[in-house]
Amino acid sequence: MRFNYVALAMLALISMAPSAQAKGLNKQQIEMCRWGSDIARSAQHSKLSGTTLWRARENLKARKYPRAWMPKMALGITEQTYASRSRLQPASVKKTYYDGCIRHEQARQHLGRR
């Protein structure tokens, strides 16, 4: 029984970690990182499943995007993912991208560039 409480406490701490990591960023910056990490996950999944880069690009071009910068960024993320020799699982790629994006945005903010 005591083990269950410890496990629940650990789970609660782990679930709060991503929000603590993004401390100081605004909602738009966090959403941009989430969106980019979803694109990276999708690109890695496509790459591992054997989808060609050409087909992945065509799929991205067919999508509708709410912001003007999104199509170009999605293509860039996808091309970088395909260029990588990584065979990581898509979930790991998503987490790695998100963590790196958050660090980048925090560094930009720290330097005074927005």
Image: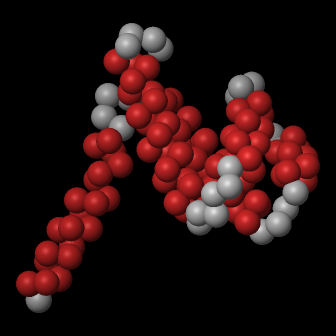
Q: Going 72% across and 53% down the picture, which residue do you hit? A: 43
Left or right of residue 112, residue 66 in this image? right
Inspect this view and state whether residue 20 appears: yes
Seen as rendered, the residue at the extreme left is 2
Picture layout, residue 52 above or below residue 2: above
Residue 65's x, y, as percent?
75, 36
Left or right of residue 40, residue 34 in this image? left
The quarter of the displayed image where residue 19 is located = top left
Q: Nearer the viewer, residue 112 or 87?
A: 87
Seen as rendered, the residue at the extreme front is 85
Inspect this view and state whether residue 78 appears: no
Q: Nearer the viewer, residue 93 or 64?
A: 93
Residue 72's x, y, as percent?
77, 30
For the N terminus, which image quadrant? bottom left
Q: Going 28% across and 43% down the picture, which residue do you hit? A: 20
Seen as rendered, the residue at the extreme bottom is 1
The quarter of the displayed image where residue 6 is located = bottom left
Q: Going 14% across and 77% down the picture, which residue do you hit? A: 5
Left or right of residue 98, residue 35 in this image? right
Q: Going 43% across and 20% down the picture, which residue do you hit? A: 108
Residue 39's x, y, as percent?
67, 48
Residue 79's x, y, as percent?
76, 42
Question: What is the count of numbered marks?
Answer: 0
How was this image coloured? Answer: secondary structure
